[in-house]
Image (spheres, rainbow, N blue to C red):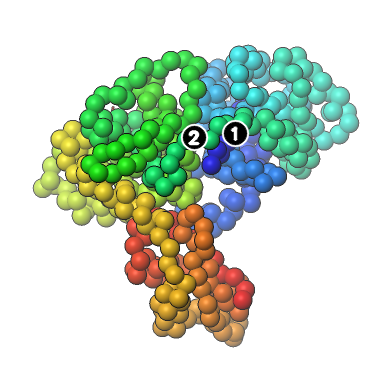
Amino acid sequence: MNNNIVAIVGRPNVGKSTLFNRLIQRREAIVDSVSGVTRDRNYGKSEWNGKEFSVIDTGGYVRGSDDVFEGEIRKQVELAIDEADVIIFVVDVEEGITPMDETVAKLLRKVTKPVLLAVNKVDNAMREKDAVEFYNLGLGEYFTFASISGSGTGDLLDALIEAFPEKPEVEVKEDLPRFAVVGRPNAGKSSFINALIGKDRYIVTDIAGTTRDAIDTKFDRFGFEFNLVDTAGIRRKAKVKEDLEFYSVMRSVRAIEHADICILVIDATRGFEGQDQSIFWLAEKNRKGVVILVNKWDLVEKDTMSTRDYEEKIKKELMPFTDVPILFVSALTKQRLLKALEATVQVFENRKQRISTSKFNEYMLKVIEAYPPPAMKGKYVKIKYCMQLPTQTPQFVFFANLPQYVKEPYKRYLENKIREKWDFAGVPIDIYIREK
Ligand code: GDP
């Protein structure tokens, strides 16, 4: 549950993205082959020694040229300090300490969060000696590695795991739904929350240095009991005036990871934009339930745009995961807010749903018989048995004689059939084909 977040910082071209890719490699490949959509490349999941964590390459969000402004670096480091539990600061032994490294070091020296100084491109004994100069950054012990070959990353990862803070488990009643309200700045998240809870308690001033972990607040509204997963990021209104994509997306990471269901609020007058898509994808990738609220619907001329047209447009952006409830609401007039809450609770129920193995087989084996997997290289693929796995999020396994011959389109077919029969609206599904 207490998923740690690691941020990689450093000036451009020190090897941040190579390190990032190395850390997230395995998982990434799987996810991208499924979606086939270009995704945000700066966020991923990783694990080491059985510990899971998320990685943010903050550098990916700062225009990368050699003459980046100090301001950009400052933003990058601030983002890391705000959002991460541990910061990896990458420097380059070939170049030695540059003025920009010093700028970053200066910012990081003030931080109470663990900072790992990682000296890249150290692939021989000579360079190992050269690395000593990085003591001058005043960040203490450093780690040497070579991101290209991967040498040294094991030690770095060991240290990383060690550095994760011991976090007290958030006290929540386990069966209570955890909803996170996410979206771009100005989409109307605070207005939505205020409308729900009936007072302006979310207008909180930002106190520098406060812990910014996600907070669960229990609500009991309209007969629904739920925990609202809030982050200081969502509250941090004063500072998030700038409509910067990476800020709103990254500020959503922790809220999303702590939630069961993400309520993605979008601004009807602006449509479903890149940032909305990135946040949606974060939720999907984390296997969270999703409900989309098209807010400010009161501002839309209904004769120029119908809900159906609007919904169609959004669904195109959601491909291939389009089975998502989309509601048209107004936080201002409180139109359909109760419906929104109902839909969210329904998605929560859908996500918990367990289909008995006998019912699942009874239905799915017929579906498979009606349209079997296409033969490959003259061989017939037979699926004789299937079941839902006892996992937190819906996962289904189909046992086949030749699992390697069951390709993506057929898995999609199975998923669609499952969705036709059972209500998994708003819930990402995993399909696995295994050898019997
Ligand atoms: P946040 O940054 O996502 O929390 O967005 P806010 O809740 O602060 O809303 C941004 C602006 O949009 C504010 O001026 C709100 O009054 C306005 N707003 C929010 N929801 C609605 C809505 O449903 N209709 C209209 N007309 N304005 C809204």
Where in the figure is residue 27, as x and y percent of width and height? 60, 51
Instruction: Name the kind of residue labelled 1 in the image.
Output: Val
Please tell me whether mark 2 sits on a helix, a strand or a loop.
loop
Could you tell me which residue is drawn at 24 percent across and 26 percent down? Answer: 199
Instruction: Name the kind of residue labelled 2 in the image.
Output: Val
Q: Would residue 365 appear left or right of 127 to someone viewing this image?
A: left
Query: To which residue does mark 1 refer?
Result: 6
* Nearest the eye: 248 or 287: 287
Q: Distance from label 2 to label 1 (Cα)?
A: 20 Å
Residue 316, picture quadrant:
bottom left
Where in the figure is residue 136, as x and y percent of width and height? 75, 14
Could you tell me which residue is drawn at 19 percent across and 44 percent down? Answer: 336
Mark closer to the observer (2, 1): 2
Marker disc for residue 170: 2
Question: In this view of the protein, can residue 85 be seen by the observer?
Answer: yes
Q: Would residue 318 appear left or right of 132 to someone viewing this image?
A: left
* Nearest the eye: 420 or 129: 420
